[in-house]
Amino acid sequence: MASAVSFARPVQAINVKSASFSALRKDNVAFRMQSAPLRSVYCSAKKETVDKVCEIVKSQLALQPGTEVCGSSKFTDLGADSLDTVEIVMGLEEAFGITVEESSAQAIATVEDAADLIDSLVVA
């Protein structure tokens, strides 16, 4: 059973609780703002998938030992160019026994993107 893992930083949201409008004057609008609780975005991919993708990315990019790679890591931030990204996708296809369509491959920018796509293809 997969558990949700958060790779995103919490963000502060604003909740507009009420607004009042004057029928006579259109320029007299009042809003009362109130802070809302912090929210997190969750990665739907399995932790095992994310971990395996991280290892494949480290290997394909020949990253130095100790280089941190996590779900939110962008391939470009790790030094990957478009050819490196193609090689990463090929490595993922081989490791997971899947075929990634070109349009889907172009949408992969982070480890999390790749893991989500892999999990959706493995289930399908």
Image (cartoon, helix red, strand yellow):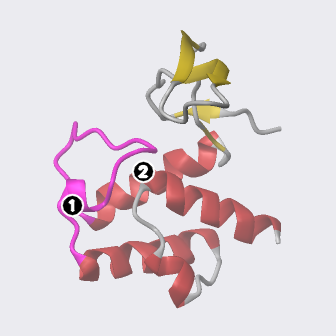
Per the image, label 2 sits on a secondary structure element best described as helix
* Residue 79 image position (x, y, % from top left): 17, 61
Q: How crowded is mark 1: few (under 14 residues within 10 Å), some or many (20 or more)?
A: few
* Residue 74 image position (x, y, % from top left): 33, 54
**Do tag 1 and tag 2 residues touch (Cβ < 8 Å)?**
no
The residue under the point 26% across, 83% down is 83
* Residue 119 image position (x, y, % from top left): 69, 60
Q: Quadrant where the N terminus lies?
A: top right
| Labels 1, 2: front one | 2
The residue under the point 38% across, 72% down is 88
Q: Where residue 62 is drawn, which disc sits there?
A: 1
Q: Is residue 82 visible?
A: yes
Image: magenta residue range: 61-81
Tell me which secondary structure the magenta stretch mostly adopts: loop
The one nearer the camera, 34 or 49, is 34
Q: What residue type is labelled 1?
A: Ala
Q: Where residue 37 is drawn, which disc sits there?
A: none
Mark 1 or mark 2: whose residue is earlier in sequence? 2
Q: Is residue 38 visible?
A: no
The residue under the point 62% across, 30% down is 24
Q: How far separated are the C-alphas under marks 1 and 2?
A: 12 Å
Per the image, label 1 sits on a secondary structure element best described as loop
Q: Is residue 67 magenta?
A: yes
The one nearer the camera, 110 or 59, is 110
Q: Residues within 10 Å of mark 2 (few under 14, many from 20)?
A: many
Q: Quadrant where the C terminus lies?
A: bottom right
Q: What residue type is labelled 2?
A: Cys
Q: Mark 2 points at which residue?
A: 54
* Residue 122 image position (x, y, % from top left): 74, 67
User: Quadrant of the rendered structure where residue 4 is?
Assistant: top right
